[in-house]
Amino acid sequence: MKQRALNEQTDYDADFYAWTQETAESICRGAFDRIDREHLAEEVADMGKRDKREVRSRMTVLMMHLLKWQAQPELREKSSWRATIIEQQEQLELLFEDSPSLYQTADHDLPSIYSRAVKRAAAETGRAAETFPGECPYSLDELLEMDLSSLK
């Protein structure tokens, strides 16, 4: 592989990892004239989008498993639903600790996240989507703090 000249910058599209390392080094050195601002801004925005997608995904899994827990009590002991619910609650708590503004996003998106969870729970249980509550019966706080022993 050819060695690059010392002053030559790595192209964002040619070697993303090298670009990230050189950009971080340029920021630390205060060499702001060497920074590819357009791509850097895009990457920073994408980091926020990634975290938002992770919250939505974890919320969907949490609600889907809660729905299955409630709809199929006879399968609770044989399933890993309890462990999955606890894991999602813990991971969401960590995400919200790191980025408190994601809590408001999750709260705002709760109806659409719930709708996706119902579709997935219906597909996995073989039950009609209409057998599940039409609207999310829980607040975000209740979902995050729910103790399964309190559910029938």
Image (cartoon, rainbow, N blue to C red):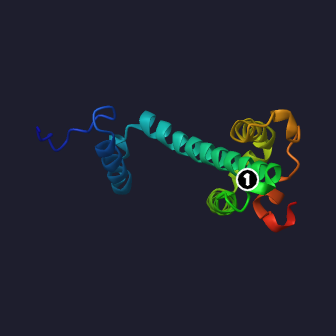
Q: Label 1 neighbourhood size at 10 Å, few (<14), some (14-19), many (20+)?
A: some
Quarter of the image for the C terminus: give it: bottom right
Relative height, residue 94 to residue 103 (above, below): below
| Residue 2 point in image, percent of width and height | 11, 38
The quarter holding residue 80 reads bottom right
In the image, what residue occupies the spot 88% across and 41% down? 133
The quarter holding residue 37 reads top left
Q: Which residue is mark 1?
A: 103
Q: Is residue 23 left or right of residue 4?
A: right
| Residue 45 point in image, percent of width and height | 54, 40
In the image, what residue occupies the spot 33% across and 31% down? 13
Quarter of the image for the N terminus: give it: top left
Task: Work out whether residue 45 or residue 105 is closer to the camera in this orientation and state it.
Answer: 105
Q: How many marks?
A: 1
| Residue 76 point in image, percent of width and height | 74, 59
Task: Work out whether residue 65 or residue 17 is closer to the camera in this orientation and state it.
Answer: 65
